[in-house]
Image (spheres, grey):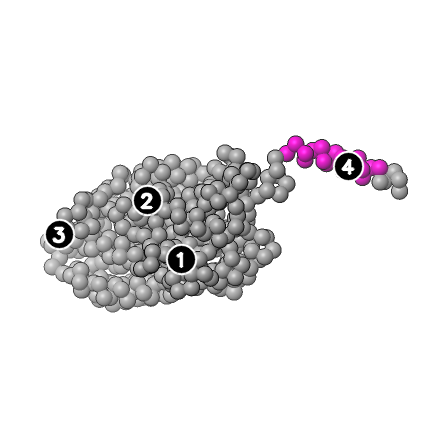
């Protein structure tokens, strides 16, 4: 027994000697950031890739200065399984906060699941930056019950009402090009959106807005988010005489729709939102049938919002061999929101960090300038501002296997306002089969 105790004593002394020279963070001083999302899908992979990039850049420079000590970031990867189960997403958030003791959380994609996860985070008074869900209600909750929901911030994208406004501008731009180039008297629009809650307000807004844009609605189609065959919908759309298909897809149906529309050479221009169409793998996933599909996006090769854009996009491509989708904005949520706030207050205390995050806007991020809307009393709503000089997103189009930025291209947001074009924007192209059908 004495010999055993002596051996343990020696082992303990060796362990102490080995760890004594290590920096404090190696033992306990880490900032735990949970990254939650549908990790088996492109959206969750974007969440994780952006967060890893932020963590590695910050840790490589010594970590985060919290008071008088440096703390390294540790990421906790959490699969929400939110496409298939809201209950799974809720349980994942619960475990992330209670068992894994995350200090902050970024991610989330499907609105219904994010709202459930949001409540869990608020119960635990932990800062949760949403990086995917677009429904306005997420930040309306902050306005209605600030004391409870103040820990939630929208990191990306701007809400669905601003999304649809941007999409309307892009749709009107494409409609204008078709009308002028092909001499079409009145542009007809088919509205196509996956059957999910976030799409509901967008469909209603689209139906209300089309007449004001001088466009004619020919119908609404709502396929499942996981549909593997939409030929019936495409046949009906072609029969309707639509010149433009206004899409609202965030899941795999975006691949199905683009591939089958390309195979059938449907003579209508696709424009709107197609999240799957934002990634490089879309071309192969559609078997090369995605040519001329246009979607709203956040990033594109060679397009720069400001001086932060190109370094972020280039490094992301170098690491992941693809252009970042908007869910990769977990990067700026960590690097440009959480970390500066923690360093400013010298604490991980959620209430103090919330105050610092509210106070540090506006500030530049790779996709523009981040700022928050405020209520009538001047209280931040943690809702992203949209517009020229802030966040606008891009319109990108698949052109012969390459994803090209095509909007804003000399966009005039208001009468008398200066034109807006970002560095690297190229002209929009009309599909040859559309030209063949309508060119006179």
Residue marked by disc 4: 11
| Sequence-wise first label, 2 or 1 | 1
| Sequence-wise first label, 2 or 3 | 3
Circles 1 and 4: CB atoms closer than 8 Å: no
| Sequence-wise first label, 1 or 3 | 1
Circles 2 and 1: CB atoms closer than 8 Å: no
| x, y percent for residue 434 | 20, 54
| Sequence-wise first label, 2 or 4 | 4
Q: Can the viewer see residue 325 in this picture?
A: no
Q: Is residue 357 above or below residue 8?
A: below
> Could you say whether the residue bearing mark 4 is in a helix, strand or loop?
helix
Residue marked by disc 2: 368
Q: How many numbered badges does the structure rendering display?
A: 4
Residue marked by disc 1: 133
Tag in front: 2 or 3: 2
> Could you say whether the residue bearing mark 2 is in a helix, strand or loop?
strand
> What residue lies at 24% left-to-right and 57% top-to-bottom?
168
Nearer-the-camera pick, 137 or 232: 137
Magenta stretch: residue 15 in it? yes
| x, y percent for residue 273 | 32, 55
| x, y percent for residue 210 | 20, 63
- The residue stretch that appears in magenta: 6-22
Residue marked by disc 3: 180
């Amino acid at each position: 027994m004495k010999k055993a105790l002596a051996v343990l004593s020696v082992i303990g002394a060796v362990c102490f000697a080995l760890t004594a020279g290590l920096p404090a963070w190696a033992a306990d001083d880490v900032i735990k950031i949970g990254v939650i999302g549908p990790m088996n899908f492109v959206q969750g992979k974007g969440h994780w890739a952006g967060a890893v990039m932020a963590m590695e850049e910050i840790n490589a420079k010594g970590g985060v200065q919290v008071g008088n000590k440096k703390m390294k970031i540790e990421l906790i990867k959490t699969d929400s399984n939110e496409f298939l189960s809201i209950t799974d997403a809720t349980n994942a958030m619960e475990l992330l906060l209670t068992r894994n003791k995350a200090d902050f959380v970024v991610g989330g994609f499907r609105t219904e699941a994010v709202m459930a996860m949001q409540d869990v985070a608020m119960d635990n008074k932990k800062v949760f930056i949403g990086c995917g869900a677009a429904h306005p209600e997420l930040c309306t909750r902050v306005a209605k019950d600030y004391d409870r929901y103040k820990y939630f911030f929208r990191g990306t994208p701007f809400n669905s009402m601003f999304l649809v406004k941007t999409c309307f501008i892009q749709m009107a731009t494409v409609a204008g090009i078709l009308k002028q180039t092909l001499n079409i008297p009145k542009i007809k629009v088919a509205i196509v959106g996956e059957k999910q809650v976030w799409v509901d307000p967008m469909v209603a807004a689209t139906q209300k807005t089309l007449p004001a844009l001088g466009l004619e609605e020919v119908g609404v189609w709502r396929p499942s988010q996981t549909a593997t065959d939409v030929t019936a919908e495409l046949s009906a759309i072609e029969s309707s005489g639509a010149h433009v298909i206004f899409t609202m897809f965030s899941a795999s149906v975006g691949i199905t729709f683009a591939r089958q529309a390309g195979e059938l050479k449907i003579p209508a221009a696709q424009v709107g939102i197609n999240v799957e169409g934002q990634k490089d793998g879309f071309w192969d996933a559609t078997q090369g049938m995605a040519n001329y599909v246009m979607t709203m996006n956040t990033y594109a090769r060679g397009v720069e919002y400001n001086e932060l854009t190109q370094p972020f996009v280039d490094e992301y491509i170098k690491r992941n061999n693809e252009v970042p989708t908007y869910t990769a904005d977990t990067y700026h949520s960590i690097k440009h929101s959480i970390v500066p706030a923690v360093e400013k207050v010298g604490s991980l205390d959620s209430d103090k960090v919330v105050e610092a995050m509210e106070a540090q806007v506006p500030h530049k991020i790779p996709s523009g300038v981040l700022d928050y809307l405020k209520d009538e009393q001047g209280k931040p709503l943690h809702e992203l501002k949209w517009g020229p000089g802030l966040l606008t997103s891009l319109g990108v189009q698949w052109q012969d296997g390459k994803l090209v930025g095509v909007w804003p291209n000399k966009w005039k947001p208001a009468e008398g306002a200066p034109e807006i074009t970002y560095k690297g924007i190229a002209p929009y192209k009309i599909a040859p089969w559309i030209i063949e059908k309508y060119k006179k």
